[in-house]
Image: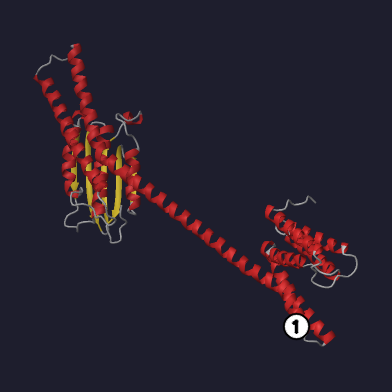
Amino acid sequence: MRLLRPHRHDVWIAVAGLAGGLLGLALDLYTFRPHGDPRWVLLGLAAMCAAELMRRSAPVLALCVAVPALVADTLTGGLLAVVVMFTDVVYAAVLYGGARASRNVLVLSVVTTVGATVAFLAATRQPEGLILGALCAGITVVPAGTAVIVRDHREAAAAERLRAEQTALLAEMDRVQAVTAERSRMARELHDVIAGHLTAIAIHSTAALSLHDRAAAGEGTDGGPGDEDATRTALTVIRENSTQGLAEMRRLIGLLRESGEDQEVPESAPSLDGVDALVRRAEQSGAASQLTFTLRDERGDAPKPPAPIELAAYRIVQESLTNAVKHASPGEVTVELRQHEAALAITVTSPLDARRAAGPRAPGARAGVTGMRERVALLGGSFEAGPADGCWRVRAELPTTEGTAQQ
């Protein structure tokens, strides 16, 4: 078996014990009256120093070496340095040994002390046996008990450190989840607010550039009033959408700069009352694509849904109309709003043909559908989007009962 390397502190303890023992030999400072050749004392001293070298690396083995070394030292006269080192070995065996070994050392120390005291009293019938018992307890029970107390404190401290680390880890996980959720919410809001305006700008700027290029090339246009009106209309839509997009962006930045943990949805937040304005704006943006838009609000006298539900419904309609302007074929786009029982249903249908399968006509594909799905999931509703009966259908149901999850 490979020998364990002693700890540097144990080396210094062994060296100090050896120096103390040699000093006791030189000055004839024995615990008891010496018996026989003093050179035998060196054997017990050397064995105890060897045990000190193993007090951390092999505490149980060190105790097994220290016990016979103490017996040999006692029989040859006894050195104070050997007794002191023995108490340190007992202390180390309990502190650094295994849990089972620590318990056994303490129990064995108590049993040995009691047994030695009773045996000496029974053999001599002298009260001096109590002094022997006190001495035996001082070199066995006291260091073992002290080590048990220190060991318990260390284990308690380690458990507290582990608990603190686990608490910190859980707190960090919660923080990361909160940051991720907030970033996702901001991404959805920015996409839903800005995407519609940028789509209109992209479509009408493309139309304006196409008219300009045709006029420059002299292909199929004479630069008459019709072309001028179309160009002016496209530029007007571009200006309106850029202005509205800038205003929406400023509103969002203002909300992000506000402080407070219990902020409510601001009064200026969009609601279902603004859906008709969305439809009119989409009709203006989709005129170049030969799209018509129809709103069917069949909510009747249903109670007004909670603010988060209204905001989510507004964003779903807004994103669906934006996608229709970008991707739909010429035809009618229908927006239906129904509120029944404890749910608000939104259905948006737009024309679909094979050209859509070839890819989107404007950037930003799929991000909007993902954002709508996330919004509905956060509110505990249902969502579906895809081809149905020859058209593209977006349908969402949002619960309007109390306890609805906040965005």
Q: Nearer the viewer, residue 327 or 109?
A: 109
Q: Residue at x 30, y 48 (%)?
A: 396
Q: Give the residue pinned by disc 1.
A: 130
**Residue with the most extreme front position:** 27
Indicate the position of residue 315 as horizontal and vertical percent values.
25, 45
| Residue 400 lies in quadrant | bottom left
Q: Is residue 144 left or right of residue 195?
A: right
Q: SS of the residue at dot 1? A: helix
Q: Residue at x 26, y 31 (%)?
A: 329
Residue 50, compared with residue 365, is above or below; it is below
Percent position of residue 188, x then y:
31, 43
> Foreground: 210 or 63?
63
- Nearer to the camera, 211 or 182: 182
Give percent across and percent down for residue 117. Answer: 77, 81
Examine the image and state in which quarter residue 293 appears: top left
> Residue 144: x percent and y percent?
69, 70
Q: Is residue 208 left or right of residue 74?
A: left
Tell which of 149 and 51 is nearer to you. 51
User: In the image, is residue 49 above or below residue 286?
Assistant: below
Is residue 373 visible in this depiction of the protein?
no
Above or below for 144 versus 251: below
Q: Residues within 10 Å of mark 1 (few under 14, many from 20)?
A: some
- Amino acid bearing label 1: Leu
Q: Residue furthest top?
A: 218
Residue at position x 31%, y 44% in the image: 186
Residue furthest out toward the right:
36
Judged left or right of residue 401, residue 136 is right
Task: From the viewer's perspective, tell me whether residue 120 is left or right of residue 378.
Answer: right
- Picture quarter containing residue 385? top left
